[in-house]
Amino acid sequence: MKFAAISITMLSFTRSTAFHTSKAFLRTNFRTVSNTAVRFAEEGQAEVILVGCGAPNRGMGWYHAVQMLEKKCPSASLDFVVEPWFMGDGADSPAGQDFKEFQTEAESKYGTKFAKSLQELPPPAAPRLALISGRTADNPKLLSEAIAHGCKCVYLEKPGAPTVKELEAMSAEAKQAGVEVLMGYNKNVAKYVRKAREFAATVPGSHVTFVTNNAYENTPESLGECFERNSEGMLKNMAIHELALLASFYDVSVDNIAEVIVDKDFSSMQTLKGPSGKAFTDFDKVKFTIKTKNGNEVSVQTDRCGGTDSYAVVTDKSGKEVFRYYMPDDEDKKHVEQLQAKYPTAMPYFFTQDPDYITVKERVAKHTVDGKPAEGIATIEIAVEALKIAEYLVPIFQKELA
């Protein structure tokens, strides 16, 4: 595609006013992409390509873009956005028109360059990080393209791939190319998870339950749309964050699972029609406990229609609740209210997890630049294990809830 020409003088002005006017910025170099001057990432920043922006106010990629454009992640410079659908066949849809407005604003205000594919981008001019936030089914192809186009590191949104086999192949491909793949499992760094684990460590025989909710309406229409849009299923979508926590902190793996206990009174499975008219079967809520062979025990509760909060509960040996910590906590609720006022039509869960999204992106971007460990960030190996657990649990739940 051809970009409209923007002068170096104008681009320098828009970038500096949007971000900052430091002396470091004045020393910034420029490159040319399709006859358009584009700023390098500054010293100490990763050159970020967002692959799969999605629709404004709904797509996770869009919210990643907003955070980086607003300089919430100091080590990340969002230089490129690759959006195959809304710059292709989906351009004329209502959501495509919304995307076009976002593109126009981002180009004019920040100088960010947009492209339909990674093939349109120039070689990297700084340590390059691809943040892949597209459709799960597209991720194997997008990872290969990111590696081929000079990415030093890849930030891959959950669950990474549709199947364990595909994700394992992606891991092997990246390892062979010397490219590190880190995952967007933001709950691994969330305050409420850390607080619950720390408290549980002080209570002998304690038990932790991780609770996560979405705010879909409890109607066939709303859940049917959810089932179709997230057709990989609840365990590979909504609950995959919790499965990553279990793999990261509780030694849960398919080989180490001794027992799975499903709370059938709480859990529910439905078959509903999506907007296309096709029927989809999935869980709208599940609660379960996993016991491991080495003596660990942990529970998860997920509800598509439970609201916007996530929290963790710690109980003692008798089953009495002794600790509960919410995301957001009282301190973060004011921040959530500010974001809701700023983006009133955006998905509510963006705001409750806003600080954690920033933390993960910043740590991954900084790691891309300096090579130091990205503390607390899940690796693709953890993602493989989480996906294995999901595939192991689905038939168990289906049998219990049939």
Image (tube, rainbow, N blue to C red):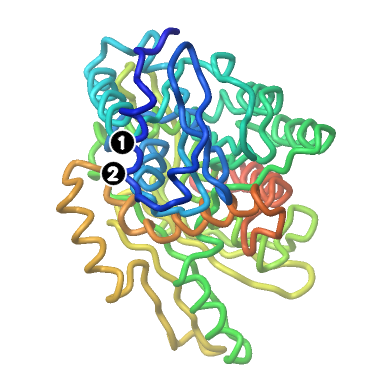
| Numbered disc 1: secondary structure | helix
On the picture, is 168 further left or further right than 335? right
Above/below status of 220 relative to 294 = above
Q: In the image, which disc is placed on residue 230? A: none
Above/below status of 112 relative to 387 = above
- The one nearer the camera, 38 or 312, is 38
Query: What residue type is disc 2 on?
Result: Thr
- Quarter-of-image position of residue 331: bottom left
Q: Residue at x 40, y 10 (%)?
A: 88
Check contact, mark 1 vs mark 2: CB within 8 A.
Answer: yes
From the top left corner, tell me how far across and down residue 42 is, in percent.
Answer: 52, 44
Question: Label 2: how many residues lie within 10 Å, few (<14), some (14-19) or many (20+)?
Answer: few
From the top left corner, tell me how far across and down residue 145 is, in percent.
Answer: 65, 22
Above/below status of 83 relative to 366 = above
From the top left corner, tell me how far across and down residue 215 is, in percent.
Answer: 27, 50
Q: In the image, which disc is placed on residue 17? A: 2
Q: Residue at x 29, y 21 (%)?
A: 275
| Numbered disc 2: secondary structure | helix
Above/below status of 168 relative to 25 = above
- The one nearer the camera, 327 or 221, is 327
Per the model, the C-alpha gap separating discs 1 and 2 is 6 Å
Tell me the quarter of the image containing the N terminus: top left
The residue carrying mark 1 is 13
Q: Residue at x 19, y 53 (%)?
A: 340
Furthest toward the right, the residue is: 176
Question: Label 1: how many residues lie within 10 Å, few (<14), some (14-19) or many (20+)?
Answer: some
- Quarter-of-image position of residue 5: top left
On the picture, is 390 further left or further right than 221? right
Q: Total of numbered circles in the picture? A: 2
